Amino acid sequence: MRLQGRVAIITGGASGIGQETVRRFAREGAKTVIADLMMEKASELAEHLRFQGHEAIAIRTDVTSLDEARTLARFAMDAYGQIDILANIAGGSAGPVIRTKHSLFADSTRERWDEMIGLNLYGALNCTRAVINHMIQRHSGAVVNVASTAGMIGMQKAAVYSAAKGGVIAFTKALAKEVGEYGINVNCVSPGIVGSARVRQMREDMVQQWLEGIPLGRLATPEEVADVIVFLSSDEASYVTGENVTVAGGLVLGPKGY
Ligand SMILES: NC(=O)c1ccc[n+]([C@@H]2O[C@H](COP(=O)([O-])OP(=O)(O)OC[C@H]3O[C@@H](n4cnc5c(N)ncnc54)[C@H](O)[C@@H]3O)[C@@H](O)[C@H]2O)c1
């Protein structure tokens, strides 16, 4: 088992990529702390994992709040005495928590910018700030941020989301430089398009258009993204830091036929 005895905080762990990451972390022997706004789903998952013999706990956390991020870190410390891994996964461009849908920047509002940047950039900053001094003191730790290909090549009708995720990638690199001397690895995963329930509900012609730009010709599964997060959290990636690993089936390679 690659994460035996490690304590891992996973934000956004109740659903999608986060949920799969929690399951994989548990399978690799980690003690998981599931932090999410959806407390019922987070608790159910923790209970299910405990039933299977894993150590798992859940706490309702709004990652947009630094105070709540600090409460999360204390909760993990009280329960398990240390924090080895932070996976900043909570985020998104649309969906149940983010109220509005994808729209043109020309129609955007300041309120919407705050919401997007609050969740997708401040969320990662808050949770990392809450744990980083502990990791520095222990001279050990791994931070894995989930950004997006939107933050690399830009996503239409999601300009502010793209800006926030681009910020996450830059934050990853800068922090990796600052904390490398303390044995802390900081990396980033940029998924392309994951075939979540939300994506499956989208218009077929829209999904078809996306598929044409993906050399592998299909969407990702949450498991495929979670596998890379596990790798970057493990000793197998001990000499990897400041990287942005794209998990996008080749989406960022440019037009086919070139
Ligand atoms: N799904 C994709 O196609 C895709 C593509 C690129 C990047 N991503 C990124 O991957 C990450 C996970 O995406 P997903 O598709 O699994 O999303 P998801 O909506 O399935 O899960 C996101 C989770 O984050 C939680 N969350 C939302 N706001 C929160 C907050 N303020 N505090 C704490 N938890 C909060 C939600 O309750 C949910 O459980 C996000 O950062 C997203 O931007 C997703």
Image (cartoon, helix red, strand yellow):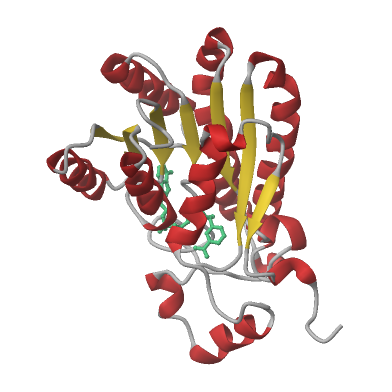
For this view, does 105 lie left or right of residue 89?
Answer: right
Observer-nearest of 113 and 191: 191
Residue 234: give x, y in percent of width and height.
Answer: 51, 35
Q: Quadrant of residue 26?
A: top left
On screen, residue 33 above or below 162: above
* Residue 119 visible from this viewpoint: no
Count the numbered circles shown: 0
Observer-nearest of 82 and 100: 82
For this view, does 86 lie left or right of residue 238?
Answer: left
Q: Quadrant of residue 175?
A: top right
Residue 69: give x, y in percent of width and height.
Answer: 43, 27
Identify the residue at the far right of this view. 258
On screen, residue 143 above or below 26: above
Residue at horizontal 62%, vertical 31%? 238
* Residue 134 visible from this viewpoint: yes
Residue at horizontal 38%, vertical 41%? 25
Pick the quarter of the image with the N terminus. Answer: top left
For this view, does 232 lie left or right of residue 8?
Answer: right
Pick the quarter of the image with the C terminus. Answer: bottom right
Residue at horizontal 29%, vertical 15%? 78
Residue at horizontal 64%, vertical 38%? 187
Residue 180: give x, y in percent of width and height.
Answer: 70, 21
Identify the residue at the far top of this view. 137
Residue 12: give x, y in percent of width and height.
Answer: 40, 46
Observer-nearest of 234 and 133: 234
